[in-house]
């Protein structure tokens, strides 16, 4: 069984009214359109934090973040892809973003947008991601 690890960041901003906003990305795919949070796989030489900073900068041009090291959620599951069995571990973290400027990586994303909690929850496409978002933010 092949092991796969991926990491997700929930980018959090404070808007001018001191309310939290969350950055969602609209992933570029051929088959469907969905909204979720930035994600990636770490390179072999990177720590989780190094890869978070690299990927956020590559995907949405965010480089000034403070990752909450005490708050995370792990999701583990098995899946099959092209006759191979995988064991997947996904780690979710929150990162507070200091700079509001974004610029998308056009080959991977259609767009990115910031939303307050209720609108972000409405926009997120996958039910499992909605559940994790609620758990991470309301703790």
Image: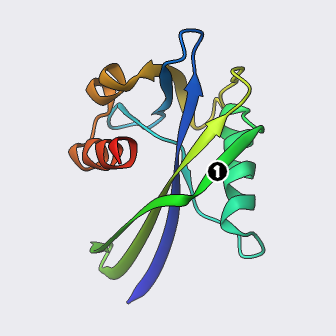
Q: Give the residue at x 58% y 22%.
A: 14
Is 67 left, or right, of 124 in this rendering? right
Point out residue 86 in the picture as x, y percentages from the top left corner.
36, 79
Point out residue 68 in the picture as x, y percentages from the top left corner.
59, 52
Which residue is nearer to you in this view: 80 or 124?
A: 124
Identify the image quadrant of the N terminus: bottom left
Q: Which residue is mark 1?
A: 67
Which residue is nearer to you in this view: 42 or 2?
A: 42
Q: Give the residue at x 27% y 41%.
A: 130
Q: Label 1: few (<14), some or many (≥20) within 10 Å?
A: many
Which residue is nearer to you in this view: 85 or 70?
A: 70
Point out residue 111 in the picture as x, y percentages from the top left corner.
54, 23
Quadrant of res 77: bottom left
Placement of 43 over or under 113, stated as above or below: below
Is 97 left, or right, of 40 in this rendering? right
Placement of 7 over or under 125, stated as above or below: below
Is 49 left, or right, of 38 in this rendering? right
């Amino acid at each position: 069984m092949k092991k796969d690890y991926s990491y997700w960041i929930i980018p959090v901003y404070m808007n001018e009214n001191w309310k939290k906003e969350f950055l969602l990305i609209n992933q570029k795919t051929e088959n469907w359109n969905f909204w979720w949070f930035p994600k990636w796989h770490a390179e072999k030489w990177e720590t989780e934090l190094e890869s978070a900073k690299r990927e956020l900068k590559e995907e949405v041009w965010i480089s000034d973040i403070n990752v909450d090291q005490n708050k995370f959620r792990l999701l583990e599951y098995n899946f099959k892809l092209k006759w191979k069995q995988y064991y997947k571990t996904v780690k979710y973290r929150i990162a507070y973003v200091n700079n509001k400027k974004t610029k998308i990586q056009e080959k991977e994303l259609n767009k990115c947008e910031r939303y307050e909690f209720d609108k972000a929850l409405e926009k997120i496409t996958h039910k499992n991601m909605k559940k994790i978002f609620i758990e991470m933010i309301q703790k």
